Amino acid sequence: MHGADYEAELTRAGAGIRGAGGHFRHLVRRYPLGAAGAVIVTLLVFAAIFADVIAGFDPTSTDATRTLARPGAAHLLGTDFMGRDLFARIVHGARISLAVGIGSTALGCFFGVVIGLASGYLGGWVDLLVQRLIDILQALPLLVLALVMAAALGPSLENTIVAIAIPLIPSVARVIRSNTLTLRELPFVESAKTVGMSELRIVLRHILPNTMAPLIVLATAQLGAAILTEASLSFLGLGIPEPHPSWGRMLSESAAEYVRTAPWLVLFPGLAISLAVFGTNLLGDAVRDMLDPRQRGG
Amino acid sequence: MGAYLVRRSFLMILTLFGISVIIFVLLRLVPGNIVDILFDAAGMVNPREKLKIERELGLDRPLPVQYLTWISGLAQGDFGYSYVSEKPALEEIGPRIPVTAKLAVLALVVSVLLGVPLGVVSAVRQNTPTDYVLRVLSLSGLSIPAFWLGLLILMACVAWFGAIPIYTEPPASLWDELLLLSVPAAAVGFRSSALIMRLTRSSMLEVLRQDYIRTARAKGAAPRSVNYEHAFANAILPVVTVIGIEAAFLIGGLIVTETVFNIPGVARYLVESIRWRDYPIVQNLVMLIAVVVVVVNFAVDLLYVVLDPRIKYSG
């Protein structure tokens, strides 16, 4: 080993970091793409929280005198066919995207964890049943299942969240189950049993915390998928109903006809979706690299 | 191997049975059936008339009976009738399959031709500017919605040629058709290529760390031969798996892309029939998709044995 290599290796591994600022700088240097993703996601959250302040216009108020206005001083990104300010709609759209993204990811992860823990820890017929159910749910593409779910539940914000959450459950359950299977055999679980800990307490206190790392990795990866699925559902007219400003919905209104006449109506909502998903994906990759050393650089 | 095949086939049938039940129940949860929609559209409200049509369509019978009618029909090759067009479902779905199949194959070709080489290059040049550019490119491929990419392509066509490529029916020739389909196929394929590229890259990186690669380098094999012969041959196996996942992934992309480009394929038809509550069509289309996904995954598992002699399946 050369001395310099060793030094570099230590720096990369994070030796000699002092204080919160040092940690922050180290993370940014170590994961530049992840830092970029964090910035994008922060912007998204910021837009969602302060939408009313930033927007300048009401996203749902129509103005018959200013329909399809080009982007300019009055309307930063132009207006749509009902004279609604596009910038205001995109800023408010961040709320919808985040609400559906976080809501369905959280819901999917919660049920995925419960089912995965039960299946992995209990084994037996519970496990057998859960495995077959997972097979069934995974044989349908995410969007197809979400489409049928959304149609069955009817268009609303809450139903869209549920429709996207259910197809997310099996992949979470699968990962948690396989983790639980390994953890169950480890000595610390055995010793917890020996001292007379109840089964439920073992699962919640010893197994669950140890499945957190893969869960966080999976959840950040699914956040992007959830946002994208909401956009697709709304684009197809089976997601968020009017007058909510959903990015996907904006594209279905404008779709092919505005490609010719009002390209800004096509350009900006799509850009918003792509940027939001891109940010969460960058962040997700960095989180995976941090928490799952086996995948590092992968 | 024989026991394995039997077991897998049994599980496949079980999965498809489960899907049929879930889809059937979900569709019956949908508020309002085809008759409600037709009557809403016509604006007339004559309860007796409505009941009569519901009886004709068999919608008044108990759900288990409706389910059994559907499944036993399927087993005999009877796919039922479309509520909307009143034509046999097979006649409606059949002609749309080749369109989507061509589109899917083209998209798969695009994604493999783009994804595998770029993934290999990205791995071989790990942590160089090339690698970073390619990684950002693949991540953006995963982040851009397929329908927006389609709209952007349409926009570019308007800007450059002043026209939008419209799918004409029937296409003048196979060549014309493939040319027309290649644009939407590129839109779907780009997205899928991102997935393949990421997988190829991490698989290559994994292999490049192995001892036998170091041995090959130590004995003086040319870097090109080590990277592209020793490593690639071993890295490609997990990439084959992704083609199974890809089947599901592609269908999602096809649904929105066929809608954007107005292509009369099965994927767009699924959305239309969901909107119309055209149960027989939706049920059969979802089953078709499930069969494709399940069979492709099975085929990929079998392909494993062919590609890697170390893998043996036992019951």
Image (spheres, rainbow, N blue to C red):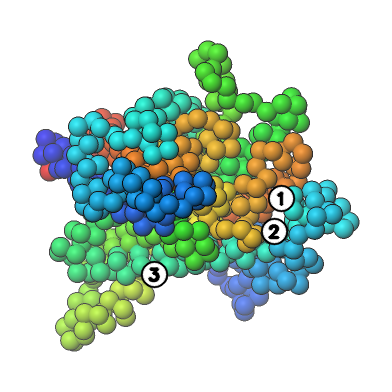
Q: Nearer the viewer, mark 1 or mark 3?
A: 1
The answer to which of B305 and B55 lies nearer the viewer is B55
- Per the image, the residue denoted by label 3 is A110
The answer to which of A62 and B168 lies nearer the viewer is A62
Q: Secondary structure at mark 3?
A: helix
Chain where mark 1 sits: A
Q: Marks 2 and 3: same chain?
A: yes
- Per the image, the residue denoted by label 2 is A90
> Could you tell me the amino acid type at mark 2?
Ile
Q: Residue at x 56, y 66 (%)?
A: A99
Alpha carbons under labels 2 and 3: distance apart? 30 Å
Precedes in sequence: disc 1 or disc 3 = 3
Q: Nearer the viewer, mark 2 or mark 3?
A: 2
Residue lying furthest top: B173
Asked if the residue at tag 2 contacts the one at tag 1, i.e. Cβ–Cβ closer than 8 Å, the answer is: yes
Alpha carbons under labels 1 and 3: distance apart? 34 Å
> Could you tell me the amino acid type at mark 3?
Phe
Residue lying furthest left: B3
The answer to which of B118 and A236 lies nearer the viewer is A236
- Where B156 sits versus A67, above or below? above
Taking the image as shown, residue B233 lies to the left or right of residue B157, namely: left
Precedes in sequence: disc 1 or disc 2 = 2
Taking the image as shown, residue A274 lies to the left or right of residue B120, namely: right
- Per the image, the residue denoted by label 1 is A268
Q: Residue at x 32, y 70 (%)?
A: A114
> Could you tell me the amino acid type at mark 1?
Phe
